[in-house]
Image: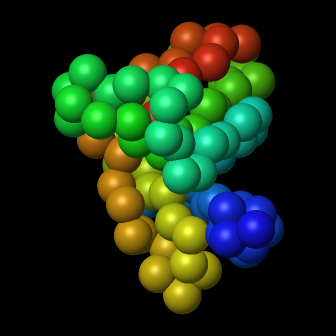
Amino acid sequence: MKCLKIISIIIFLLLKANVHAQIPNIIINEFLALNSNIIYDKDLFQYSDWIEIYNDDLSEINLNGYFITDNLNDPTKWMISDDIIIQAKGYGIL
C-alpha cells in the first residue's frame, strides 16, 4: 500500500534550463519506483528507480541540461547529466 501511495503522488517534470529553446516532444513512457528486483544498475551496484523516456521527435535529443523532479516547488531537483542522447522515435532509461 505504501508503494501505491508513493506512486500516486509522484509527478515527473522535465525542464530545460533555457526556457526559450524549442521544447522537444519527450514522453515519460514508463517508470518504476521502489525497484527491488527488476532492473539492476551496474554502475551503482544496486536496483535503482528508473524512468523510460520516449522521444517522439524526428531528430535525436540530448537530455543534458534537463531536470527531473517529484516536487513542483523544486523543479531542478535532479539534473540529467552524462550527455544522454535519445534517438529519433527512440527510448532511453534514466
Picture residue at 28% right of the left edge, 41% below the top: 81
Residue 76 visible in the current orientation: yes
Q: Which quadrant: the N terminus? A: bottom right
Q: Say which of 2 and 93 sits in front.
A: 2
Task: Tell me which residue sits at (21%, 35%) in the image.
Answer: 44
Task: Please indicate whether residue 4 sits to the left or right of residue 34 in the image.
Answer: right
Question: Residue 18: image x %, image y %?
Answer: 44, 59
Location of residue 34 with respect to 52 vertically, above or below: below
In percent of width and height, residue 4 lies at: 76, 63
Q: Position of residue 53 (x, y in %)?
A: 63, 32
Q: Would residue 59 be seen by someone viewing this image from the given angle?
A: no
Residue at (65% x, 13% y) in the render? 90
Q: Quadrant of residue 67?
A: bottom left
Of residues 25 and 68, the one nearer the viewer is: 68
Measured as percent of width and height from the top left, residue 55 is found at 67, 25
In front here: 62 or 76? 76
